[in-house]
Image: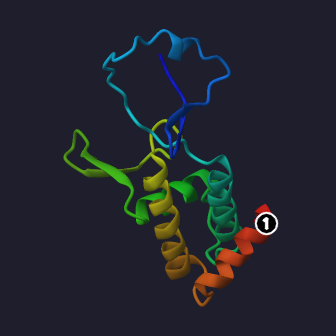
């Protein structure tokens, strides 16, 4: 059973349309729960706006697709899995940013580090606040 709750001063309040799941829990029953903060879809869109600005304004003319570019930014931001292939070569795979695979706090850290990577390697000379302002303008924040 999956329950969605909201924390208020009085405790956790059910956010489900139906209270059936809560009503099935007996008084004083002990449950095991995993607490997750849902990812913010607007923040996810904000990250893609950031990537689009960098991709469209990169100085290097190459054949890199947006998906390849996105994965490279993720890896250079320190979010990758590493393993050795069958020849012993080290392989670095960008971590998935799907809602199911990356928690909200980890995604926020990725966003922050990605800004640093973009300013260092792609949009050299642009100021942090200028880039953030550009992103916010695009998504209407």
137 in relation to 69, above or below = below
The answer to which image quadrant residue 101 occupies is top left
Residue occupying the point 56% across, 57% down: 70
88 in relation to 26, above or below = below
Position of the C terminus, as image quadrant, is: bottom right
Asked which secondary structure carries label 1, the reply is helix
| Residue in the foreground of this view, choosing between 124 and 109 | 109
Residue occupying the point 37% across, 53% down: 80
- Image position of 130 (left or right of 101): right
**Residue 121: x and y, percent?**
51, 78
| Residue in the foreground of this view, choosing between 64 and 25 | 25
Residue occupying the point 51% across, 46% down: 9
- Image position of 126 (left or right of 75): right
**Residue 4: x and y, percent?**
54, 30
**Residue 68: x and y, percent?**
55, 54
| Residue in the foreground of this view, choosing between 97 and 62 | 97
Q: Which residue is mark 1?
A: 138
**Residue 124: x and y, percent?**
57, 86
Answer few, some or many: residues within 10 Å of disc 1's Cα (few below 14, many 20 plus, some between 14 and 19): few
Residue occupying the point 41% across, 37% down: 35
45 in relation to 35, above or below = below
């Amino acid at each position: 059973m999956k329950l969605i709750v909201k924390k208020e001063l009085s405790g956790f309040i059910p956010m489900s349309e139906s209270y059936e799941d809560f009503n099935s829990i007996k008084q004083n029953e002990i449950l095991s729960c995993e607490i997750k903060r849902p990812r913010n879809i607007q923040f996810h869109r904000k990250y893609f706006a950031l990537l689009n600005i960098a991709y469209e304004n990169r100085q290097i003319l190459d054949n890199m697709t947006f998906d390849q570019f996105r994965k490279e930014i993720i890896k250079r931001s320190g979010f990758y899995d590493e393993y050795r292939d069958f020849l012993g070569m080290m392989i670095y795979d960008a971590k998935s940013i799907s809602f199911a695979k990356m928690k909200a706090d980890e995604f926020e850290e990725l966003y922050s580090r990605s800004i640093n990577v973009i300013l260092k390697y792609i949009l050299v000379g642009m100021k942090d606040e200028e880039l953030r302002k550009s992103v916010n303008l695009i998504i209407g924040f």
